[in-house]
Image: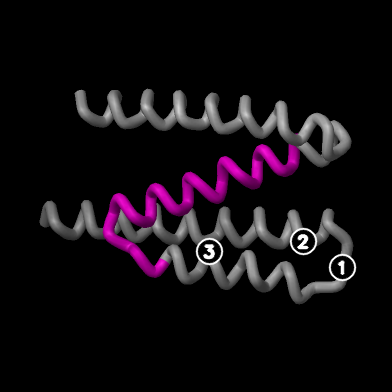
Amino acid sequence: MISLWLFLTYLLMEALINGVFHVVSKRMKSQENRRVSIFKGILERLLLIVGLIYGYPQVIIAFGALKIGTRFQKNSKISNDYFLIGNFISLLTAILFAIIIKHFTASF
């Protein structure tokens, strides 16, 4: 029951954040950049939420390092977005895999 409540709360938070982002970015960016930014924002928050809920506070350090890393690259915005998205997916996958391994090893 609590898992459903947490999931619904997360969906509501995403809807609210993306609604605000849509209004703000409508005046700032093109349509295609907004879609990538929305996806990137969802991944960022999901990575931080999952990492913190399951006891991996180091995810904040990794998140900050990745964000700072894109500031040093002189490449285009698109390559920075793909860099961040790819790394967020990799970190999230590693955290989820660690959670699954912990769950199954604890049951044996």
26 vs 93, left or right, is right
Which residue is identified by label 2? 80
Which residue sits at x=76%, y=35%?
A: 25
* Along the line of sight, the residue nearer the viewer: 105 or 32: 32
68 vs 72, left or right, is left
Rendering quarter of residue 4: top left
Residue type at mark 2? Asn
The mark that comes first in sequence, 2 or 1, is: 1
Residue type at mark 3? Phe
Which residue is identified by label 3? 63
Neighbourhood count class around disc 1 (C-alpha, 10 Å): few under 14, some 14–19, many 20 upward: few
Disc number placed over residue 55 in the picture, else none: none
In the rendered view, tell whether residue 40 sits above or below residue 56. above
The mark that comes first in sequence, 3 or 1, is: 3
How far across and down, in percent of the image, does residue 10 sit?
A: 41, 32
Rendering quarter of residue 12: top left
In the rendered view, tell whether residue 23 sits above or below residue 76. above
83 vs 46, left or right, is right
Which residue sits at x=11%, y=56%?
A: 108
Q: Which residues are magenta?
A: 35-58
Disc number placed over residue 75 in the picture, else none: 1
Asked whether 79 falls inside the magenta stretch, the response is no
Q: CA distance from mark 2 to mark 3?
A: 14 Å
How far across and down, in percent of the image, does residue 37 sit?
A: 71, 43
Dominant SS in magenta: helix
* Secondary structure at numbered mark 3: helix
